[in-house]
Amino acid sequence: MAARTPALETFPPLRAWQRKALVEYLRRRTDDFTAVATPGAGKTTFALRIAAELLADGTVEAVTVVAPTEHLKTQWAQAAARVGIQLDAAFRNADLHSSADFHGAVVTYAQVGMAPQVHRRRTMTRRTLVILDEIHHAGDSRTWGDGVKAAFEPAVRRLMLTGTPFRSDDNPIPFVTYERGGDGLLRSRADAVYGYADALRDNVVRPVLFLAYSGETRWRTNAGDELAARLGEPMTQDLVAQAWRTALDPAGDWMPQVLRAADARLTVLRNAGMPDAGGLIIASDQQTARSYAKLIERLTGERAAVVLSDDQGASARIATFAASEQRWLVAVRMVSEGVDIPRLAVGVYATSASTPLYFAQAIGRFVRARRPGETASVFLPSVPHLLGLASEMEAERDHVLGKPKDREGFDDDLLERAQRDDQASGELEKRFAALSATAELDQVIFDGASFGTAAQAGTPEEEEYLGLPGLLTADQVSLLLTKRQAEQLAAQRRRATERAAEPAPAATAAPPQPMSAAQRRVALRRQLNALVAARHHRTGLPHGKIHAELRRLCGGPPSAQATIEQLEERIATVQTL
C-alpha cells in the first residue's frame, strides 16, 4: 500500500522565519533553494513542511534526505514520521529501492558517495525532492561532492540546509549558488537566512556565556628543556599549540579545575529552573575522552556517558542520555551538527579543533531553547583564536572561493606536528611531556564584549561568575555581567586604598614594578568595557553593537584578541563618540 499524503492541517505552527521562508520558497518555485539558519532555529521542521507541501500538490512523489551521520538519519526519520512523512532510515545501497510504505529514504553523504548511480536511478524513477542537510559536507571530498551532484541532478527540487558557517576551503558545494562580488571573488548566496542574532532577539535560542580560562603551563621537550607559557599570551603558533595541549592534559591541574567549575555552574542551572540540565565535554581523541570521564566521576561521584565514535551503539547512547537526567556526556566529534539534546546547557570545549565551522557546530549543541530565560555556558581555553570565534558568534559567513587563506586556529594534525616541529626554537624534533598547568578565569565573553578580571580557580571572585542566575534574558545577562564587573573593580579599588593607608615600612619601599603586557591588556580591557558600559547607559545601544562600531572605526580583532595599541586606540575613540 502506498504511503498516505501528509495532512498539512496537522502540521505544527511555524515560527515567523519559517513562514517567511516558506512563502518565499512557494513564490519562487525554483529547482534549488538554500536556507541558512542557526542551530536550534527549526531547519528540520521548515524542510519537512516544504516536503509536505510538494507531496500534497503533486509536485513530487518522493523525498530523499541526505544527512552527515547515521545518528541523524534516525533523527530525521523520527521527525518526519511525527508529521506524517514516512522515511526509510534503514535503506542501504544494495536495496536499490525503498518499500512502497515509505515516501522516501534518509541516507548519508558517504552512502551517496559510494554508489551515486544507485541514488541517481532512484531519483529518476519518481519525481523527487532532495533535502541536503548541512550541505557543506558535500564539499568534504571530491567523491562526496561529485557523488551528490551525479546522484541528484535529475531531482525535481533540491533544498539545501546549513546551520553553521560555510567551508573555509575552495571546494565548491554542489547546487549552491555563487555570485561574484566587487572584489572579484565568488560568494555563496542563500535564499533564506536566519542568524543567531535574529534567533536570540526572537527568544528562539539561548544566550551563550563563554567562560575563558587562562593559566600557567609548563612542559618538557624531547631535549630535556622545560618551557613555560601562559595561555592567552602572544606567542608563536607552535608554542600556543603546546601550551594548549598541556592545559588539556587530563593528568594536569587545569582540566580538573575547569571541570570542577563547569560542574558547579551545572549545579547552579539545575537549582535555578533547569532541573535536567546536562553538560557536554568535547574531547580531541578517544583516550582523552575516557580520561575526562574518569575525572568527572572522581570530582562528582557520578559516572559520565561516553560516546566515542559513530558506531552502532552511539545513537542509542545519545538517545538514552537525551532522555535521562544524567549530568555529563563526553564525546569525540560524535555530538556534532544536528544532534538534538535540548537539555545540554553547559559545555567544556576541551578539543584542539578550532576552525570556524567546527566551533560553530560545537556551540550549536547548547543554544536550543526550550523555555524563556534559559542560558548556556561554555568553558574554553583562553586561546586567542577561540576567543575571537566566541566574540564573533553572531557573525554570518558565506563560502568564499579564491580568497587567500590564513591559518584559522589549530586542528589535531597541527598539534601533532607541534610536538615534532618547533618553529620558534628550530629543534628538529619536539615531543613534550606536560608538567603542570593551573587554571584561572580570565574573562567572560557575551554578545561580543569581554567582562571580568582575572580570578583564580576556587576563589569567591570566580564563584561570583559561576553563580550567575540560570534563567535570564539576553539583556539581563548583559546588565548582570556589567554589574558584577563593576563590583569586582570596586573591591579591587578598596583593597588598593586599604594597602595605601597602611603605615609605610621603615625601610625604603621598592620602586613599583612596571606592569607586564598581560597586566596592561587586562587593565585596558577593563577600562574599555567600563567606557562601553557607560555609552550603553547613555544611548541604550547593546554592548556588542558598540564594540562592533569601535572595530569598524579602528580596525582589528575583537577586544579579547586585540593588542595593547588597538585597545588604547578604541579607548580614545569611544571617549569621543
Image (cartoon, rainbow, N blue to C red):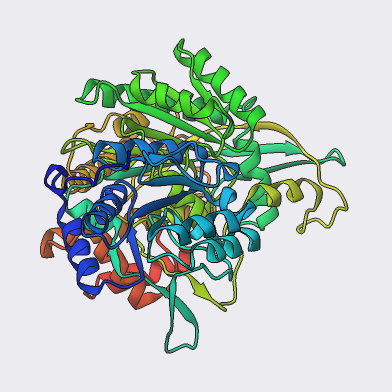
Q: Residue 125, how many percent across, how many down?
A: 46, 58
Q: Quadrant of the N terminus?
A: top left
- From the viewer's perspective, tell me whether residue 326 is left or right of residue 42: right
**Residue shown at the point (44%, 66%) measured from the top left:** 557
- From the viewer's perspective, tell me whether residue 283 is left or right of residue 414: left
The one of 77 and 196 positioned closer to us in this rendering: 77
Q: Residue 47, how many percent across, how many down?
A: 30, 53
Q: Residue furthest top?
A: 301
Q: Residue furthest front?
A: 1
Whether residue 337 is visible here, answered yes or no, is no
Q: Quadrant of the C terminus?
A: bottom left
**Residue shown at the point (59%, 33%) measured from the top left:** 309
Q: Residue 337, how many percent across, how many down?
A: 44, 46
**Residue shown at the point (22%, 48%) measured from the top left:** 478
- In this rendering, the answer to whether 274 lies above or below 32 is above
- In this rendering, the answer to whether 549 lies above or below 214 is below
The one of 513 and 408 positioned closer to us in this rendering: 408
- In this rendering, the answer to whether 369 lies above or below 449 is above
